[in-house]
Image (tube, rainbow, N blue to C red):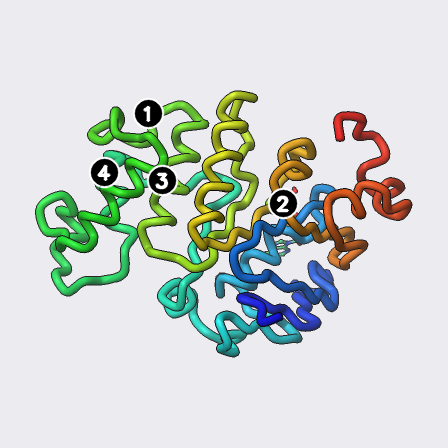
């Protein structure tokens, strides 16, 4: 099978710390893949390497048939990868609508960066409308994003990522701070997006959410892959139970 994203023996070393050690994984097209593991396991570092925020110390990243290990992040985004952040990153003072317009690749007029609501081009406008609609944010269109509840701010981040028209959407702990109903609503929404052809790679600590959503899971532990497989396989893997899931009763 041709994969959309493939990591081949990727390592990331900070000073003396091996935050990632020979990690190989792949995301098939139209699939939802989860990355789980204890705090400090290297999950966010993995996302940072894939998106070009960090350079891999060793190994290769191939996306959509292109070797992009050394690409800068803006080029990776244009190639079709969008992400959200573990710590929400929204701009102070900007409305939801403005966030949805500024994220998109440059469409000529730089004034849109200062006055996004006036100078956005029609394509950007349409994508922003769609994202607003998909995430049910219409009622908050003109609200300053940072004044919204945590769950809604997470939705704004995801909607913003979607406006770039990605092939792969990467979510770093999307349900952190969401209540049960919000998480369930998001799960159904992500399944719908996957059904429309989007691939999703997500990090999450909420095990019931992950187990019910993902087709494939990778388990990171101390920077190395501990296990991979379907949720059922991972859930019954003795090494995973020992290192990570042992205390989880909910899954
Ligand atoms: N910029 C950096 N400089 C030095 N060390 C870093 C840097 N970024 C991450 N690390 C280290 O890499 C390791 C993995 O961190 P990372 O944030 O990737 O873990 P994580 O799995 O996302 O954890 P969590 O579940 O708590 O978010 C940690 O030991 C962390 O201190
Ligand atoms: Mg993290």
Give the image quarter of residue 111: bottom left
Q: Is mark 2 on a helix, strand or loop?
A: loop
Residues at marks 1 and 4, CA–CA distance in whole angstroms: 14 Å
- Please tell me which of labels 4 and 3 falls first in the chain: 3
- Please tell me which of labels 2 and 3 falls first in the chain: 3
The residue under the point 69% across, 45% down is: 36
* Front in this rendered view, residue 171 or 217: 217
From the image, tell me which residue sits under label 2: 214
- Please tell me which of labels 1 and 4 falls first in the chain: 4
Badges 1 and 3: C-beta atoms under 8 Å apart?
no
Nearer the viewer's eye, disc 1 or disc 4?
A: 4
Nearer the viewer's eye, disc 1 or disc 2?
A: 2
Nearer the viewer's eye, disc 2 or disc 4?
A: 2
Q: What element carries label 3?
A: loop
Q: Could you tell me which quadrant the N terminus lies in?
A: bottom right
Q: Ligand 2 closer than 8 Å to the CB at disc 1?
A: no
Residues at marks 1 and 3, CA–CA distance in whole angstroms: 10 Å
- Please tell me which of labels 1 and 3 falls first in the chain: 3
Are there few (<14), some (14-19), or many (20+) residues within 10 Å of tag 4? many
Residues at marks 1 and 2, CA–CA distance in whole angstroms: 31 Å
The residue under the point 89% across, 41% down is: 242
Q: Residue 147 carries which label?
A: 1
- Establish if 218 lies above or below 91: below
From the image, tell me which residue sits under label 3: 90
Which residue lies most toward the left here? 118
User: Where does the image place residue 209, in percent across and percent down from the top left?
Assistant: 63, 33
Residues at marks 2 and 3, CA–CA distance in whole angstroms: 27 Å
- Establish if 86 lies above or below 163: above
Give the image quarter of residue 13: bottom right
Are there few (<14), some (14-19), or many (20+) residues within 10 Å of tag 1? few
Q: Is mark 1 on a helix, strand or loop?
A: helix
- Establish if 9 lies above or below 117: below
């Amino acid at each position: 099978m041709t994969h959309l994203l493939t990591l081949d023996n990727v390592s990331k070393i900070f000073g003396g710390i091996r935050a990632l050690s020979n990690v190989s994984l792949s995301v098939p097209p139209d699939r939802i893949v989860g990355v789980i593991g204890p705090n400090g396991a290297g999950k966010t570092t993995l996302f940072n390497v894939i998106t070009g925020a960090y350079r891999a110390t060793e190994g290769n990243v191939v996306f959509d048939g292109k070797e992009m290990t050394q690409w800068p992040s803006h080029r990776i985004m244009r190639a079709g990868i969008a992400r959200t952040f573990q710590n929400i990153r929204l701009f102070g003072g900007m409305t939801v609508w403005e966030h949805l317009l500024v994220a998109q690749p440059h469409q000529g007029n730089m004034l849109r960066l200062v006055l996004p609501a006036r100078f956005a081009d029609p394509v950007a406008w349409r994508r922003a409308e769609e994202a607003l609609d998909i995430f049910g944010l219409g009622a908050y269109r003109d609200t300053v994003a940072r004044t919204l509840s945590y769950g809604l701010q997470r939705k704004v981040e995801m909607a913003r990522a979607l406006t770039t028209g990605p092939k792969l959407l990467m979510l770093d702990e999307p349900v952190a701070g969401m209540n049960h109903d919000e998480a369930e609503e998001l799960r159904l929404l992500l399944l719908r997006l996957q059904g429309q052809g989007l691939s999703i790679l997500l990090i999450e600590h909420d095990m019931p959410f992950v187990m019910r959503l993902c087709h494939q899971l990778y388990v990171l532990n101390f920077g190395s892959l501990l296990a991979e497989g379907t949720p059922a396989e991972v859930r019954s893997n003795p090494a995973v139970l020992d290192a990570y899931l042992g205390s989880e009763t909910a899954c």
